[in-house]
Image (spheres, helix red, strand yellow):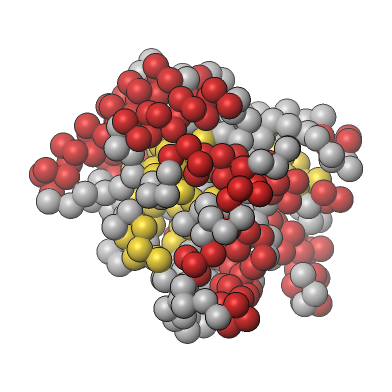
Amino acid sequence: MNNPFANLARRGLFLFDPEAAHGLSIKALKTGLVPSCPRGQDMRLAQTVAGLVFPNPIGMAAGYDKNAEVPEALLKIGFGFTEIGTVTPRPQSGNDKPRIFRLVEDEAVINRLGFNNEGHGAALARLKACSRDALIGVNIGANKDSADRIGDYVSGIHTFYAVAKYFTANISSPNTPGLRDLQARESLATLLSAVLAARDEEASRSNRRVPVFLKIAPDLTEEGMDDIAAEALAQDLDGLIVSNTTLSRDGLKDQAQAKEAGGLSGKPLFEKSTAVLARMRKRVGPDLPIIGVGGVSSAETAAEKIRAGADLVQLYSCMVYEGPALPGRIVRGLSDLCDREGLTSIRDLRDSRLDYWAERKV
């Protein structure tokens, strides 16, 4: 981030606790203080994935706009799509503060938020006020104290069906005890069967089929990846999102903050998440859509996700360090890459380094 004004803004935000700084950034987007990115459409970046047309492949990942406060503002700063949530049926406060930690030397973040959000009702009211054309996904989860976690996911499908462009079932956060257990094959089969049945029920009523994605962790074993791939294909899932935060602390410079519990995101997640992405692409074949997430901080890292097998790319934590101009810079950089390499579509990059990343030891 070489812009002196952007550097000054970052230093100012870093004077605040990370969670307070996050709140200030939401307010800035609400009030229009964050400049919009000119939306000159480069058709080489447009993608049709799971039946949806994305103007560019760069999305805001879930976790930033938990309560659907600024989805349209995010689209105005360069994102091709955005994902709200994770949202649970009932409001919940999440884990005790402090629960977000910056690892500045590593350009990383550790969080243990615990699905803090205002619940289905608040998010739904805001989404109803958004343009029907806005490409907004809804990331659904379960309340920490839920007696029926699968029922919470089903409730999310029914509640948001009229306003969601796609759904993400988030079973990969490390900050809700037992949630990642839903990635085990038997539990996953039960979850996907229930969620997809709810989607099909709503689709038959509305004559509109909303895609469902599954967001997985980067800390899976080879057997765990086998199970998820098998269920994704058997259940006719619409796609995968690879990946959520990691529990690994390998290679970090800031060893003091590294001791904090929670999921790690940002630049150190790039290699691990990209390798898992490629391994999942190998398992599910060329047709199942995959959204690549983890450590995306530039046009080149976004392009590398695509080379490793991603159809679309999401980011979040790297904006903490690169600022709100990051999505616009990445989109422009991808256009420049298409120019340099003579690409007719950014999709031409897909899988071009699949073997390299699938074999990478991380």
* Observer-nearest of 84 and 306: 306
Where residue 291 sits in the image (x, y, percent)?
49, 51
Where residue 147 sits in the image (x, y, percent)?
38, 15
* Observer-nearest of 76 and 94: 76
Q: Quadrant of residue 213?
A: top left
Q: Quadrant of the N terminus?
A: bottom right
* Observer-nearest of 169 and 44: 44
Residue drawn at (58%, 73%), measured in percent from left and top?
334
Residue 62 in sight: yes
Examine the rendered structure and indicate whether residue 272 appears above or below residue 346: above
Left or right of 340, for residue 309: left
Residue drawn at (60%, 63%), measured in percent from left and top?
303
Residue drawn at (46%, 48%), measured in percent from left and top?
290
Where residue 294 sits in the image (x, y, percent)?
63, 48
Examine the rendered structure and indicate whether residue 120 appears above or below residue 76: above
Residue drawn at (74%, 59%), measured in percent from left and top?
321
Left or right of 261, for residue 232: left
Left or right of 200, for residue 40: right
Q: Quadrant of residue 10?
A: bottom right
